[in-house]
Image: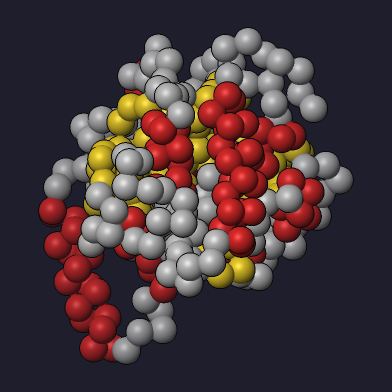
């Protein structure tokens, strides 16, 4: 275990793929001064060899500080294999549904931080580093900072609010969020981890068939607000939730300091197997995207 480092913050990118785009994004993140930075890798399908969970790996001739996890950590922490309304043995599906789990893994091995920032692998910072983004939040003391934080209603069109009566009665205020960019305090992580274990026992014993295991995007903000933790939204002026398709070089011309999600990193590779007719449409799309704004440019 790492020893306590007062007021220190850890930055990490979570990924299950290794490509040039992900490594370039890590390099941008690692330029942030006064922060520690890691690439947090789900090793389920990658088969990376390692002697320690925290290690330095060489990717694309760049040294990358890594934290490598797999199903063994999940078992070690005793976290439930639940998605939607059932036990689920597919670890990748469990990871997607319960994105908060990665905070528990990292904090368990690296406990010496006050705050932990998580960025999804398909987040793109349109700048030379993340420093301008992080500067806006460095003095924020909230336990949770997250995108699209808002009140939500039970049984709304948002699927995660349905069939949650097994854990929340009508007196509980429900909150929603979006998880590609999120910061949690150490105290909040410890609390949420224990609540996941408590919820698993309640869920498994609940008699109702119409029950939905809480997705991370409702579980995290609702539990924290319900239990008097401090929460706040990441300004929409800093993060754009707008799907963009860039190739693995992810070149930008005019940095605006914004974070974009989701940004795909293997667009040109994915179109190789498309039909010639599809390629005509794709080429037009690329042409249109070049002139859509002055923020991005493709390398073909």
Q: Position of residue 155 (x, y in %)?
A: 28, 59
Would residue 227 be visible to someone looking at this image?
yes
Q: Residue at x 47, y 51 (%)?
A: 167
The answer to whether residue 292 is left or right of residue 229 is left
Q: Give whichever of 183, 23 is nearer the camera.
A: 183
Q: Give whichever of 268, 243 is nearer the camera.
A: 243
Quarter occupied by residue 57: top right
Q: Image quadrant for the C terminus?
A: bottom left
The residue lying furthest to the right in this view is 51
Q: Give whichever of 94, 84 is nearer the camera.
A: 84
Q: Residue at x 40, y 56 (%)?
A: 165
Quarter occupied by residue 235: top left
Q: Position of residue 77 (x, y in %)?
A: 74, 46
The answer to whether residue 286 is left or right of residue 168 is left
User: In the figure, 235 relative to 71: above or below?
Assistant: above
Q: How many marks?
A: 0
User: In the figure, 248 relative to 85: above or below?
Assistant: above
Would residue 42 be visible to someone looking at this image?
no
Q: Give whichever of 111, 161 is nearer the camera.
A: 161
User: In the figure, 176 relative to 263: above or below?
Assistant: above
Q: Residue at x 76, y 23 (%)?
A: 2
The answer to whether residue 110 is left or right of residue 155 is right
User: In the figure, 151 relative to 83: above or below?
Assistant: above
Q: Image quadrant for the N terminus?
A: top right
Q: Position of residue 23 (x, y in %)?
A: 54, 46
Q: Position of residue 200 (x, y in %)?
A: 61, 54
Identify the image's colour scheme: rainbow, by chain, secondary structure or one colour: secondary structure
Q: Residue at x 45, y 62 (%)?
A: 212
């Amino acid at each position: 275990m790492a020893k306590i480092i007062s007021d220190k913050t850890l930055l990490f990118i979570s990924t299950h793929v290794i490509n040039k785009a992900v490594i370039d994004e890590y390099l941008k993140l690692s330029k942030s001064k006064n922060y520690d930075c890691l690439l947090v890798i789900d090793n389920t399908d990658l088969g990376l060899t390692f002697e320690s969970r925290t290690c330095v790996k060489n990717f694309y001739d760049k040294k990358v500080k890594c934290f490598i996890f797999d199903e063994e950590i999940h078992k070690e922490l005793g976290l439930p294999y639940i998605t939607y309304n059932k036990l689920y043995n597919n670890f990748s599906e469990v990871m997607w549904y319960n994105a908060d789990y990665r905070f528990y893994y990292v904090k368990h091995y690296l406990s010496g931080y006050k705050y932990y920032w998580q960025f999804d692998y398909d987040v793109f910072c349109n700048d030379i580093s993340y420093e301008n983004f992080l500067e806006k939040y460095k003095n924020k003391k909230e336990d949770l900072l997250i995108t699209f934080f808002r009140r939500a209603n039970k049984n709304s069109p948002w699927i995660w609010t349905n069939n949650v009566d097994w854990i929340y009665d009508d007196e509980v205020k429900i909150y929603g969020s979006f998880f590609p960019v999120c910061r949690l305090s150490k105290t909040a992580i410890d609390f949420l981890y224990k609540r996941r274990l408590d919820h698993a026992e309640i869920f498994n014993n609940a008699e109702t068939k119409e029950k939905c295991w809480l997705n991370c995007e409702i579980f995290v903000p609702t539990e924290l607000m319900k239990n008097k933790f401090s929460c706040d939204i990441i300004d929409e002026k800093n993060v754009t939730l707008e799907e963009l398709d860039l190739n693995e070089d992810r070149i930008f011309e005019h940095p605006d300091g914004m974070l974009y999600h989701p940004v795909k990193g293997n667009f040109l590779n994915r179109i190789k197997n498309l039909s010639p007719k599809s390629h005509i449409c794709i080429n037009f799309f690329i042409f249109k995207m070049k002139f859509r704004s002055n923020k991005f440019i493709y390398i073909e």
